Amino acid sequence: MKVKVRPLNIRLLKPTVAVARDAFRDPASLTPHPLKKNIGFKGSLFVPTAPSRKPPAWVELLNEGVRSPLSLVNASSSAVLIVETSDRFFAISFGYGSNLLRQELIERDFGLKVALNTVDPDALRSVDMDTREDLTLHTRRQASAGSRLLTFGLDVTRDLMRSVTGRLRDPSIGKQVTGSDALALNAQIEFTGLGAKCDRLLHEYGKKDYLKEFAFVDHVRKIRDPNLKDELDQLLLQGLRAGTSTSGYLAAPKPIEWDRFSAFNYSTEGHADDHLDLDLAHYLGTLDTGALSISKLRRDRIGVKYADADVTREKWSIYDAIVYEATHKNNLYALSAGEWYVIEPSYARRIENDIKQIPASGLKLPAAKSDEVEKDYNERVAATMKNIALLDRGIRSVTGANAPIECCDLLTLGGQLVHVKRKTRSSTLSHLFSQGVASAEALVSDNGYRNKVASLLKRHPNHATLFTTPTFDAASFEVVYAVITKRTAAWPSSLPFLSQLNLANAARILRRMGYKVSLLRVDVP
């Protein structure tokens, strides 16, 4: 008889699991079913004692319109088979069985590593990724036929691979695999073969074959282990309570309409006091830091006011706005937009070296005042320095773009496109770096956009000619990233790692387009 192809959903449990029942959130609610003898492996099947039966959520709406109430219920069937082999425990879930497991005991990225070690790199069908920008974007890209990774447009410097689906190189393992924390596998298998299958998957998990095609997955990884998250949150609290942290600051976790922006405020002040910038020290000064907790950081909110309204609108969690880095057990971790990431040490060193290779700008700009916002600083520079034109908030539309793009903040006669941002503004400074890339791409590709920028320079006709030449030569321009920050001997290594990562990525893209790139520190008291 031909062996059936069956879908399997397999998780590897951490070595700390001593007995099968330890893997479950509520073992008392489960009934264990012993396995037959002589099946080739040890294990137990666990099934909820009483399957949950409750009305579907949509019944309430329908009952409002029918004469007699509906008595419909859902039966949520679930089961988990615990397989013990090779001195490890595996959990094979059926139905809603994965919800029965203790999430902190699941070996993270087991499925992803197995999939990357076994998949045919020319036969990928789907890739799930997180993109680290002002927002963390969760996307899934699928191909109509098996394809290489390049087809999916994944940028290895900023995208985190969460899951991959593809055809397996070795059909003895299975036909198709999807890997994330769990491994979803379609394989010809009988029950007695589950122990050997888990043995094989554990062997594949231990390999390093994925480094040939997918080494980038180890560079930056999102932390999903609840216990590790708790440990890192405690490090965050220790630093905030002691006031000794130099790596932490507040940053808007979502994009802000800066052309309409008026002020920030904090719920700890009743949203009554307005502030031109986010300041972690100021927020901490509004409360008793001895009573600080993660739950309070999640409850307290940041509000935003815009110039055309007096009311506070966006209200973000303080926790989601904290950008923080910490070293823990010899690893570097970063908190950004409410998520913890671990950075592979050699990759961190490589990015730091890339940043050091970005030359310091030869442009000399005056120091910023301690209470000076970017708009006022840019206006002061343009008013006091010859050959510099103000383009701050000179936003113009681009053909095919979803939103208007600001060319730059300051423009020199020598073709320096200067983008200015305080270190404490915008999540990990990505707004600054992405602004430079977006305007550079628009200038290269859209003659209409260049003419619109030139129209903003009526008072500076010599500057306007930079954009009205018959052909645009990116090599004659220099993108200058000017960061307003306190003087430090470690500059630019003092930038948070995620900021360094975004800067390195922006510099790579700009150089590829032909632009020169430089970095400028604007001192502030």
Image (cartoon, grey):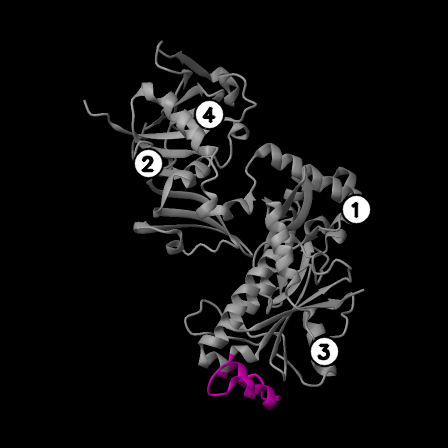
Distance, label 3 to label 2, CA atoms, is: 64 Å
Determine which of the numbered discs, if any, sits on residue 243 in the image. 1
Circle nearer the viewer, 2 or 4: 2
- Tell me which amino acid carries mark 2: Asp
Q: Which residue lies furthest to the top in this view?
A: 37
- Marks 4 & 1, CB-CB < 8 Å contact: no
Please give the residue where the numbered disc 4 appears in the rendered image.
100
Q: Which amino acid does label 1 sit on?
A: Gly
Q: Distance between the residues labelled 2 and 4?
A: 32 Å
Position of 87 relative to 185 (above/below) = above
* Any part of residue 48 in sight: no
Secondary structure at numbered mark 4: helix
Under tag 2, what secondary structure? loop
Q: Is residue 469 magenta?
A: yes
Q: Disc 4 and disc 1: Cα gap in Å?
A: 41 Å
Mark 2 or mark 4: whose residue is earlier in sequence: 4
Whether the residues at callouts 3 and 4 have beta carbons within 8 Å, the answer is no
Which corner quadrant holds the C terminus? bottom right
Residue at image position (45%, 46%) is: 212
Task: Work out whether mark 3 precedes mark 4 in sequence or the reverse, and give the earlier one.
Answer: 4
Considering depth in this image, is 194 or 280 the residue closer to the camera? Answer: 194
Check disc 3 and report its element: helix, strand or loop.
helix
Q: Residue 350 carries which label?
A: none
Kind of residue sitting beneath label 3: Val
Image position of 450 (left or right of 228):
left
Task: Please provide the residue range marked out in magenta.
Answer: 451-473
Is there CB contact under 8 Å for labels 1 and 2?
no
In the rendering, at what x and y percent does residue 73 appear?
Answer: 34, 27
Q: Mark 3 points at which residue?
A: 381
* Disc on the earlier residue, 1 or 3: 1
